Amino acid sequence: MKKIEFNSLSEQYRHMKNDIDEAIKSVLDSASYISGPQVTELEHELCDYVGRKRCVSCSNGTTALIIPLMAKGIRSGDAVFVPDFTFVATAEAVSLLGAKPIFCDVLNDTFNIDPDSLEEQIIKVINDGLYTPRAVIPVDLFGQPADYNRIYDICEKYNLFILEDAAQAFGGTLDGKKCGSFGEISATSFFPAKPLGCYGDGGAIFTDDEELASIMESIRIHGKGQHKYENVRIGFNARLDTIQAAVLLTKLKYFDAENKRRNEAAALYSELLNGVAETPAVRHDCLSSWAQYTIKLKDKVERDSLSEYLRLYEIPTMIYYPKPLHMQKAFAAEEYSQDDFPKSSDLCERVLSLPIYGYIGDEIIRFICEKIYEFFK
Ligand SMILES: *Cc1c(COP(=O)(O)O)cnc(C)c1O
C-alpha cells in the first residue's frame, strides 16, 4: 500500500491539476496579482455558497477574526468569551486588541463551547466588574457547528454579539444552514489543510450587515476611505492574493464532492471503530465538514501508546490539541489552574485525530482500523 498521509494535498492537486494550473496561469498572464477580478468573483461565489449578503476576503483566518473585532471597536477593558479547547488564534485575536479572552469549558461529545459554561462565565465577569462583556467567539471545531440555538438565546439575554470562528468548518451545516452564516459576523480560513484550502494563506469574513462589511473592507486596506490614499481609520494590509482567489474558485467546484467523501470516510471509521474507541459524535441537526476525525481514548497513556503503535505502521496521527488555552503561557496561565476547565483539560489528554481528506480510500481506513483493533488485543 502507498504511504499513508494525514491529509494528502498532493493527491488533491493531482485530481484537479489542469484546472488549477490554468487558473494560476491566467493570473500570471494578467499580472493583476493584488485585487484582481478573481477576488471579487470569489467573494460573490462564497456568499452564494454560505448564504450571506456580504463576503470580505482577507489574508488568513487570523485576520478574519481580527478585522471584525476591530470593526466592532473591541478594545482594552472588553471581555470576549472563547472556548478553552481550540486553536490559539481564536483567543489571540482578542488579546491582540488589548481585550480579555474569557475561556469557557467545552462539551465532551461535540468538543464545542458549552453554553452552560458560557453563561456561568458571563455572570462571573459581570459580578467581578473588571471587564465589559462584549462578544462570544464560538468555534465550529473539527467541522461541526457550535450549538447556535442556545448561544443565540444567551447572547440576546446579555447583549453580546457573535463572531463565528468557522475556520475549520467551511461546508458544515446546522438545521441546513451553512457554517459561515451564524451570528452577526463569521470568519473562516483557507489555510491549505482546512476543508477548503488555498495554496498559501487566505481567509474570509461573512456578514449580512452592509455597513459593517464596508468598514471591514476599509480596515483590510489600511483604513481607506473613498480611495486608496484617503485614510479614515486605522487598518492594516490584510488582502487575499489574486492567485489564491483563483485557486479557491477552482477548488470550490470540487468542494461538495470532497466534503461528501470526507463524510463517507468518517462514517466508515465510526462503523469500524464502534465499541473499540470513542468515536466523534455529530448532532442529529448538524453536518460536519470533517476538518478532523478525532477519537477519544481512555486516558493519556492509552492515547500516547496507540499513537506510537500506529507510527510503527507509518500511520500518521495528530493531537488537536495537546494543551488547553488557559494553560498556555501566552494567556497568563499563572492566573488559572489545570482543573478550571475540566472537560477541556481532559480532552487534551485523550484525543487523537486520524487521517482524513477528500480523496482517502476505504482500504486506508480499513488498514488503520485493523491496526487499532490489534493495538487493543
Ligand atoms: C486555523 C484556525 C484559525 C486561523 O486560521 P489561519 O488561516 O491559520 O490564520 C483560527 N481559528 C481556528 C479554530 C483555526 O483552526
Image (cartoon, rainbow, N blue to C red):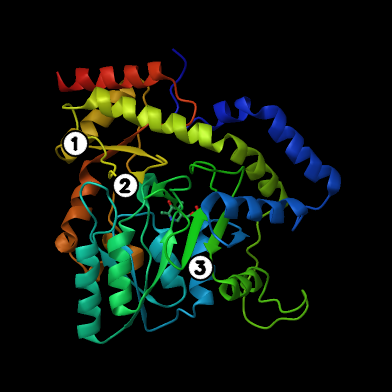
**Of marks 2 and 3, which one's residue comes earlier in the chain?**
3
Amino acid type, callout 3: Ile
**Does residue 222 lie above or below 27 as drawn?**
below
Instruction: Name which residue lies at 52% across and 32% down.
Output: 257
The verdict on label 3 being within 8 Å of ligand 1 is no
Q: Would you say residue 337 is visible in this rendering?
A: yes
- Check disc 2 and report the residue beneath it: 285
Say few, some or many: other residues with alpha carbon within 10 Å of mark 2 (under 14 / 14 to 19 / 20 or more): few
Q: Secondary structure at mark 3?
A: helix
Q: CA distance from mark 1 to mark 3?
A: 35 Å
The quadrant where residue 106 appears: bottom left
Residue under circle 1? 297
Q: How busy is the neighbourhood of tag 3: few (under 14 within 10 Å), some, or many (20 plus)?
A: many
Residue labelled with disc 3: 66
Pair 2/3: label in front? 2
Looking at the figure, which quarter contains the N terminus? Answer: top left
What distance separates the C-alpha of mark 2 from that of mark 1? 26 Å
Q: Position of residue 19 (x, y in %)?
A: 70, 32
Q: Describe the element under mark 1 as helix, strand or loop.
A: loop
Q: Amino acid at mark 1?
A: Leu
Residue at the (64%, 69%) spot, across then down: 217
Give the mark nearest the N terminus, 2 or 1. 2
